[in-house]
Amino acid sequence: MEFYTYIWRDTNGVPFYVGKGKAGRAFDVKRRSEQFKTKIEAGGCNVEIVDWFIHESQAHAHEVELIARYDRAAIEAWGLGNCYLNFPDKVEAA
């Protein structure tokens, strides 16, 4: 299986990023947003490969499911596309 979904978690185990990728994408911390880099540089974060898929479309569908499971308001308030999670100090009431 070539494609996978992954979750980055902070020091408290709270997810702050959901993504899909292949090869080393989940572990690449250089090609990320400044918000992501700031969170990683604070330390204590880790990445978890959630599931593996044959087709990218399957990984994408699972990514969408994972995002729906977490705080959609935080994602939208941060304006970080469909995958950055859990910044309640920056989230305004929806």
Image (cartoon, rainbow, N blue to C red):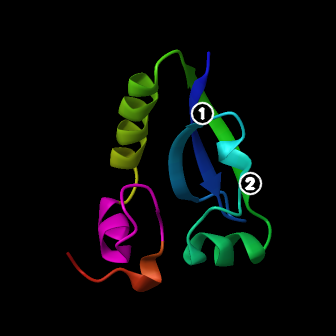
User: Circle 1 is placed at which residue position?
Assistant: 50
Report the residue at 65% width, 44% height from top. Answer: 25
Seen in the picture, residue 72 relative to 47 is either above or below; the reply is below
User: Circle 2 is placed at which residue position?
Assistant: 46
Q: Quadrant of residue 71?
A: bottom left
Are the residues flagged by discs 2 and 1 in contact, CB closer than 8 Å? no
Q: Which residues are magenta?
A: 72-86
Report the residue at 37% width, 69% height from top. Answer: 74
- Tell me which amino acid carries mark 1: Val
Q: Label 1's element?
A: strand
Category of crowding for the residue at label 1, using alpha-carbon neighbours closer than 10 angstroms: few (below 14), some (14–19), many (at least 20): some
- Tell me which amino acid carries mark 2: Asn
Quarter of the image with the C terminus in it = bottom left
Quarter of the image with the N terminus in it = top right
User: Residue lying farthest right?
Assistant: 43
Find residue 81 and report its horizontal and vertical position in percent: 36, 61
Find residue 24 and report its horizontal and vertical position in percent: 72, 40
Report the residue at 57% width, 26% height from top. Answer: 3
